[in-house]
Amino acid sequence: MELATEGPGGGKISVLCDFDGTITLIDTAEFLLDRYADGDWRRVEDLLEDGRITIDQCMSTQFAMISLSRQNMLTELDKVVVPRPGFSRLLDACSAGSARFRVTSAGLDFYIRHFLAANGWGAVEVVAPEVMDNGSGVSFRFPPIREPQARNFKEDQVLRERASGRRVAYIGDGVSDLWAALSADHAFAVRASRLDRLLSREGKEHRTFTDLGEVAEALFPSPAGLEVHGP
């Protein structure tokens, strides 16, 4: 199945991409929570998947269980975080195809920008909650939602792009990516991830990948070799 990269009226495509577990091979929040959380942070994640709390409430509740400073988080994460293969290829393909690329993450904004800059991708646009030191840990200020039907800020980003006449490809791996992926024209999920499972449950056609170069191939222009799920 061919993917059209022209939007209504000839508009181009926007590519919105999650960070943790999508651009990186590990989820930075999960890494920190596994090692430093004082409490059952996975239960909070289950509440998010069940729709009983918002992503804002989820992240704020989970990181209230951690008493690390931002600098200590940077130090710990720099030891373990590496990019997923194919990210440079995806960025190059978006640039060559005049596509708008944006990181859309519910993670740690300061680490995302630090990681991108350290790898030579500092010009990449990032939309993520602002993380603030509060003395004993960190708190989050999430991006405002402008589209009234948006169920979280990631979906809001998708709906804003579509309202401007652009087609949207959304790339992710987790629960917080579900609404954005459902609203996107083209959805991509890390193979065997939570998002892959949830999109299959919802009957949303999507493509799976392990290397972001596969996404680049699908969008610009050939989808050969990708698994397609859904109707």
Image: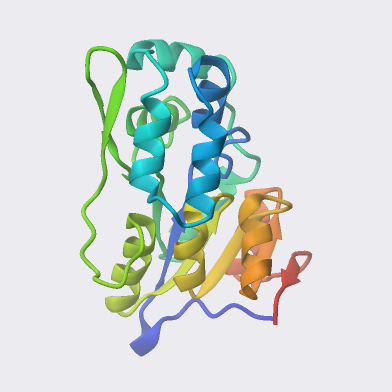
Closer to the camera, 172 or 178? 178
* Residue 136 in picture, x, y percent from top left: 28, 13
Which corner quadrant of the image does residue 187 belong to? Answer: bottom right
The structure's colour scheme is rainbow
* Residue 111 in picture, x, y percent from top left: 39, 27
**For the point 36% across and 63% down, which residue is it?**
151
* Residue 12 in picture, x, y percent from top left: 39, 74
Instruction: Answer with left or right where residue 126 lies relative to residue 27.
Output: left
**For the point 34% across and 17% down, which residue is it?**
70
Closer to the camera, 38 or 166? 38
Evaluate whether residue 93 shows in this view: no
Instruction: Answer with left or right where residue 145 lies relative to residue 171.
Output: left
The C terminus, quarter of image: bottom right
Closer to the camera, 45 or 30? 45
- Seen in the picture, residue 99 relative to 162 is either above or below; the reply is above
- Seen in the picture, residue 231 relative to 127 is either above or below; the reply is below
* Residue 21 in picture, x, y percent from top left: 58, 40
**For the point 57% across and 45% down, which residue is it?**
22
- Seen in the picture, residue 77 relative to 46 is either above or below; the reply is above
**For the point 66% across and 58% down, which residue is it?**
196
Evaluate whether residue 7 shows in this view: yes
Which corner quadrant of the image does residue 67 belong to? Answer: top left
The N terminus, quarter of image: bottom right
